[in-house]
Image (spheres, helix red, strand yellow):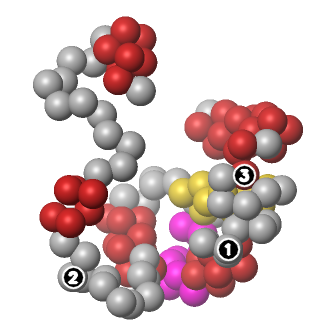
């Protein structure tokens, strides 16, 4: 990753990129959500109300046990948004688990969907 950052992206940083950092994990402040269900609804709703043009694309893997697709569907159904803002939320389920993009055919489908979302 460091090689890619420096050579391809020409990103200069004195600290090397670390995939896993036990030091960062130990210093992270988890207090707002420690040992609780992480409820993103109020944060997402606030962001969408402040910026009505905000568009959200949620991707799910059918076999994802870390962030189950049915939970995401439920959460987004419960957002208290004006009806016209609900069309700013897109959700797509893909074959696979938490890292569904590791499958080549799913990755191609995801890329096509993301290109459509961004354009």
User: Given the current orientation, which residue lies at the most extreme front position?
Assistant: 22
- Number of the label disc, if any, that sits on residue 100: 3
Spot occupied by residue 117 in the image (x, y as percentages of width and height): 64, 43
Whether residues under marks 2 and 1 lie with C-beta atoms below 8 angstroms apart, the answer is no
Marking on residue 65: 1
Q: CA distance from mark 3 to mark 1?
A: 12 Å
Q: Residue 91's spot in the image, x, y percent?
A: 69, 61
Q: Is residue 79 magenta?
A: yes
Q: Residue 41, percent across and down?
A: 45, 79
Relative horizontal placement of residue 80, taking residue 77 as reference (left or right): left
Is 64 in front, or is 108? 64
**In the image: residue 97, left or right of residue 4:** right
Number of numbered tags placed on the structure image: 3
Q: Quadrant of the C terminus?
A: top right
Residue at x-position 72% and y-position 79%: 70
Q: Which residues are magenta?
A: 77-86
Work out whether residue 49 can be spotted: no
The quadrant where residue 116 appears:
top right
Q: Within 10 Å of the Cα at label 2, are there few (<14), some (14-19), or many (20+) other Cα atoms?
A: few
């Amino acid at each position: 990753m460091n090689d890619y950052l420096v050579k391809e992206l020409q990103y200069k940083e004195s600290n090397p990129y670390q995939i896993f950092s036990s030091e960062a994990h130990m210093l992270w402040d988890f207090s707002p959500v420690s040992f609780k269900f992480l409820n993103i609804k109020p944060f997402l709703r606030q962001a969408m109300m402040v910026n009505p043009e905000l568009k959200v694309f949620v991707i799910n893997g059918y076999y994802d046990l870390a962030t189950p697709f049915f939970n995401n569907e439920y959460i987004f159904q419960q957002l208290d948004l004006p009806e016209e803002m609900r069309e700013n939320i897109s959700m797509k389920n893909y074959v696979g688990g938490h890292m569904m993009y590791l499958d080549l055919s799913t990755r191609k489908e995801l890329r096509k969907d993301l290109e459509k979302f961004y354009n």
